[in-house]
Image (cartoon, rainbow, N blue to C red):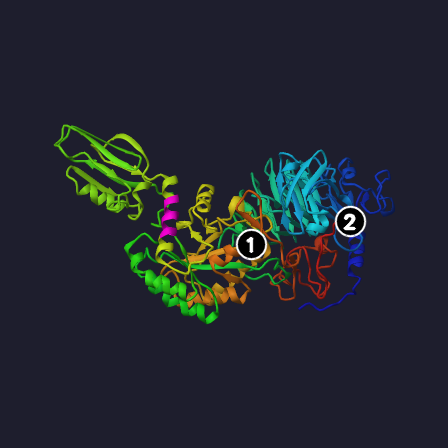
Amino acid sequence: MKIPRICAGVRTCALACLLAGVASASTYYVSTSDGDDSRDGQTAAAAWKTIAKVNGSTFLAGDQILFKRGDVWRESLVPPSSGAAGNPIKFDAYGTGDPPTITGYQDLPLASWTLDSGNIWKASITSASFNYILFGGSIWGLKHTNGKSACVAPYDFYFASNVLYVYSVGPPVSYYGSVAAMLMTNGQLLYVNGKSWLEIQHFKLSYFDAYGLRIGGASDHITVANVASEGIIPAGTTPHGFYVNASPSPTDINFYNVDAHRNYDGFRFDGSATAITVKNCRAYANRDAGIQDNTGVSKFSYCHFYGNGLGVVTSSDTAGARDDGNNVAGYSAPQVQGFARYPARITITVDDPGLADGGDTYVDSILPAFDARGAQLGIAIVTGYAGSTALIPKFQSWINAGWDVTSHSWSHQYFSNLNGFTIRYTGAGSAATMSISGNVLSTAVTGGPGGENLSLNLGNASYDTMSELVATINGRGGYSAALDPTCQGAVHSIALADVSAVNIKTDYSTLLQKDRLIPDEMASSKAWMSANLTVLPSTRVYVYPGGWEDSQTQGWSVAAGYAGARGAFKLDLGNKDVYGRGVNVQNITSFGVNPWLQGKSTQEMDAMMAALVFKSSVWGVPYGVFWHKDDLSIAEVGNLLDGLIHHGATIMTNTQLVSWLTGQAPVAGTTTYVTSATGTEADFRPTAVSPTVNTGADLGSGFRYDLMGVDQSWMGSGWEMGAFTLVPGSGPFVVMVQ
């Protein structure tokens, strides 16, 4: 633990020391609170006001452009000049308090709003366009482009000619709690474009949908230090906290003591480069990766990456970047001030009883582990087999005992594999063709013995499954048929695709038709359960085999009467299936334990469940964790449950989760539902027990002051990783908005 050795006025003292030690040609000051662009900007008393003034000026090597702490700008900073080797142009902070903030966040207070008509309210905003409105501090609105009349439900908005229209029953601030527009759409808050020899320190970048800090064009020799970049907006496959895609290949790009949290990628490097250094940095809870390096040259050291990758059960912390040593070990919990914006709602399911022999006995073997912990288990059954019928008493006993039994399809057939069976005419006829139309399979043989032609009604109970149909064809003289290895025998024959007079003198492979297969799988399974089981919930849930689903199948699920479904092994629509943007109840993200959670020790399982809970809590992502017979031992099941419970997960059944979701606010015209955050804004500053405290590298006097202006060595010689040094007893860091 560091030993305190300076006074509480460290921030003012640190800034004075920093600026006194900087030699520069000229120093310019910028302040939104007391600046004026008509001044010369060369003293704090004569500060400029806008970033536009900075962007439109020319600077010389060694110049400093200092932004006042506590002030907020809603403009993009684009450094207009290059420095020189050994004499960079510096962009930095002056004063005390919170860092200078560049943000897209524009609060719209009560006075901004007037009634337009009915339940449509309007506010004037000076902006070319934007795509995101934040309601109540945590729910992202639904943008309409076809006029204000489309705003007919909560969270609807429309923007045109500098006027924002929103649906609201009464004044929007009263109805929603708060309304904020996210400005600077598809841009960047800080853009280094074709400039070199720059040093950028002590900025907070927040609420952007594309890039926080972007380096492009012919840029090189750029150092970024003590900066935090949090995009926060779930904008599909953006935003990126720190983005490099410069040409020609940069040779000297450095990121020191920076934080990149709650973006799509914390760091993203595209194009080509010779050297990119990431040192003393942190990246937490980015929806895709902590670092996504597509250049293959970046090196990271003395860094901590945690809880990245919302669409995977593991963490996708670094991809393509090279480990240069002294990093915090993976799955080491960050121990931050706070991250639980949402309850981590997680379902646990064993799939396939009825399909896999012994699935029922495996389920029975692990139920005591759930009972002992007061946890819920979901059981997803396949209904189209003789084994399913034999297990009706067992299925009913699970239901009677309070376990959640849901539909896992009729046959477990994937629509990614649409091969049916092969057929060949083997008789003496000179020609033979086959047609499938109107649920009738028929053949026409030329020159063969009488009675060889087939006319089979595919809905006939005697051969209404693929295995029965193949057996029936083989039982008729003159034909050979074989089920394709990818085709499940219980698939109903009516799922076959139509063909017309195809040659079957040689092997012909039939195909299943997706829009026949999937609706039948859903309807048949649901009907079987309703006919054979009692006390089923009114909320019916579907579990996709293999996680195969898409927008078509989601529609069929709704048509079949399923209130929700556990779907793909990913987040919907570019890793943005989060509560604030809307969770698609027909595609709840699935995670299989095989192989990622198999063979883990008690400690390893606990650490991985901690990361899963962390991701879910930060963003509000509901997860469905599942496995099959014998994927986990009884002990491993206990470890998984203990890890989730230990780290505060809300374990629910599939039916409970779907019922809860459908009770939240619907997004009109979709199967998505949104809900407000229940906790405070995430605060990723370290606590005293964080693994980043006292484990960073000493980067030298030029970078020793953290984002808040605090000397890294104020309590000893050790440095923290990231933009914040440890200040015990300090209050939460808040992004200031005005």
Left or right: where 228 falls relative to 305:
right
| Whether residue 361 is situated above or below residue 195 in the rendered picture | below
Q: Nearer the viewer, residue 564 or 255?
A: 564
Left or right: where 39 falls relative to 183:
right
Q: Nearer the viewer, mark 2 or mark 1?
A: 1
Q: Does residue 296 appear in this view?
A: no
Residue wearing tag 1: 663
> On the image, which quarter does residue 550 sit in?
top left
Q: Earlier in the sequence, mark 2 or mark 1?
A: 2
Relative image position of residue 404 (x, y in whole percent): 43, 61
Relative image position of residue 714 (x, y in whole percent): 73, 63
Relative image position of residue 269 (x, y in whole percent): 57, 43
Determine the secondary structure under disc 2. loop
The range drawn in magenta is 519-527
Any magenta on residue 338? Answer: no
> On the image, which quarter does residue 458 sit in?
top left
Residue wearing tag 2: 71
Q: Nearer the viewer, residue 181 or 443?
A: 443
| Whether residue 726 is situated above or below residue 548 in the rendered picture | below
Q: CA distance from mark 2 to mark 1?
A: 41 Å
Please name the amino acid that badge 2 sits on: Asp
Determine the secondary structure under disc 1. loop
The number of numbered discs placed on residues in the rendered structure image is 2
